[in-house]
Image: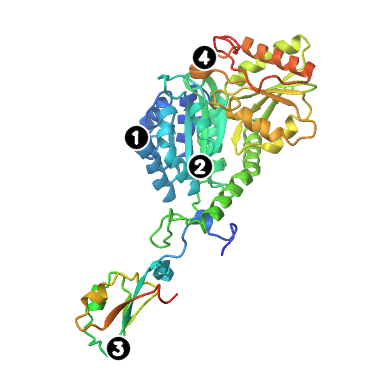
Amino acid sequence: MKTWDEVPFAGYILEPGNAESYKTGDWRSRQKPVLSQEKCTFCLLCWIYCPDGAIVRKEDAVEIDYYHCKGCGICSYECPSGAIRMKSELEET
Amino acid sequence: MVAGMVLALNGDEAAAYAVKQCKPDVIAAYPITPQTIIVERLSEFVADGELDAEFISAESEHSALSACIGASAMGARTYTATASQGLALMYEMLFVASSFRLPIVMSVANRALNSPLNIWNDMSDTMGARDCGWIQIYNENAQEVYDFTIQAFRIAEDHGVLLPVMVCHDGFIVSHSTEGVETLSDSEVDSFLPPRDPVYPLDVERPVTIGCVGVPEYYPEIKYQQEVATKKSISKIKEIMNEFNEDFGRNYGIIEEYRMEDAEVAILTIGSASGTAKDAVDEMRTEGKPVGLLKLRLFRPLPVKDLRKALSDVKVVGVVDRHISFGALGGALNMEVRAALYEMKDRPHVMGFPTGLGGRDIRVEHFIKIADELLKIAERDMLEEDYRVVGCRGPGCIGP
């Protein structure tokens, strides 16, 4: 990490739009969505409803961006085909 | 205005006139006695078309300084003025201004704090704001107010400093006393003070974020950077003062010595009391008593090395504060001078004399009493009290 003589002047942020590189998925606690590609119908409701833009839309499938997912579970709740299951992360550790 | 005219100005008017010549872009202020004359004059200059500045009459001092912060972040040369309760109301924003490293200049006509309600002079206001990260310069008279208001902009905006500056003068004693002030011509001020060259102004073409969150992983680094900048500013302040001295025939320093040759005891003052103390020193010297005077002009950053050097040969120092830090060792100046001298090999005794509270007059005889006390301490080579209040009726104090 940067030392006092390396951090920018007075703590200013000099690169605009760098929030993109901030991995807010670090805040996620307890549960994360797990997607079953077999059950997914590519209806894109999860992509529409995700408040954090953590559902990434590919050409014919969606992926979950765990660097930004907060684990709220809205995608799982909205998914009409039961393709997204919330899994406890406590079990993993 | 004609070059080098001597004008009859009180301390507040001297500040206003100097500010006008420094051509600020934005002035945001709220009136409060005894600073009011400054902003009244400035609003007149703007209304009369003599000064092309945005004058914002804010609804409070908190808002006034907030407006100054915004304007200064845009790159504007920015000025405000306040006193006492007004400075207290600004407190939150004082830290923001210095932490953003914004070169705002603020005049403070020092005044006591409530309660009891008191509009008269002491330094409770700015001394209480000593840890806010602002440079603090204390002036003895209207001439100094004029000269240091101009230097304050140059100091604040210097890329080796980039810190806000408080230019302090004693309320009423200086703010409302009319004196002859030797002014500079507008072109002389222009040559000494170039237009501001902001480092990271708010600009849509070059966006920056100011005032973001500083999590524990970064806060100490950002604060230490500020500490280093503040400490380092001393040499730049000296440099700018010397340039002003050379250009305009003045003789200013961050500490000034008066009759310190062979002095065994020294009185250390700040602000307008210094003039009265000089008379007392003269009287003592006539009687053959080895008393000298040190006037501290720069209180923040504290010139620790210069204090050590200036006081290395005396046996006793009497520090005259114009406020009390309740429950400690008298005033802040006393505590800091003591702390600065503590690691010296043959350090002098240091005793504090808080005085002049809430406008109580400090007279020559007070300083003679202080000097006599210092000579007694020198004789017995022992300090019996950390401080004693001067100019107060009752047991334990040196009377009015």
Residue B360 circle label: 4
Q: Horizontal and vertical percent for residue B13?
A: 46, 25
Q: What residue type is labelled 1?
A: Ser
Q: Count the marks: how many? A: 4
Residue on which the image places disc 2: B164
**Label 3: few (<14), some (14–19) or many (≥20) C-alpha neighbours in 10 Å:** few
B228 left or right of B347 in image:
left
What number is the disc on residue A37? 3
Q: Tell me the CA gap for discs 2 and 3.
A: 60 Å
> Which amino acid, mark 4?
Arg
Question: What is the CA distance from the residue labelled 1 to the residue labelled 3?
Answer: 61 Å
Which callout, 1 or 2, points to the residue nearer the camera?
1
Q: How crowded is mark 1: few (under 14 residues within 10 Å), some or many (20 or more)?
A: some
Residue B271 position within the rendered picture, expressed as x and y whole percent measured from the top left: 58, 25
Q: Are marks 1 and 2 on the same chain?
A: yes
Q: Which chain carries label 2?
A: B
Marks 1 and 4, how far apart at CA: 28 Å
At mark 4, the secondary structure is loop
> Looking at the image, which residue is at 40% across and 58% down?
B203
Residue B387 against residue A22 in the figure, above or below: above
Q: Is residue B365 above or below residue B247?
A: above
Circle nearer the viewer, 2 or 4: 4
Label 2 in the same subunit as label 3: no
User: Distance between the Cα atoms at labels 3 and 4?
Assistant: 84 Å
Q: Residue B60: give its label.
A: 1
Q: Distance between the residues labelled 2 and 4?
A: 30 Å
Camera-side mark, 1 or 3: 3
SS type, badge 2: loop
- Residue B393: x %, y % from top left: 54, 9
Give the chain letter at badge 3: A
Callout 3 amino acid: Gln
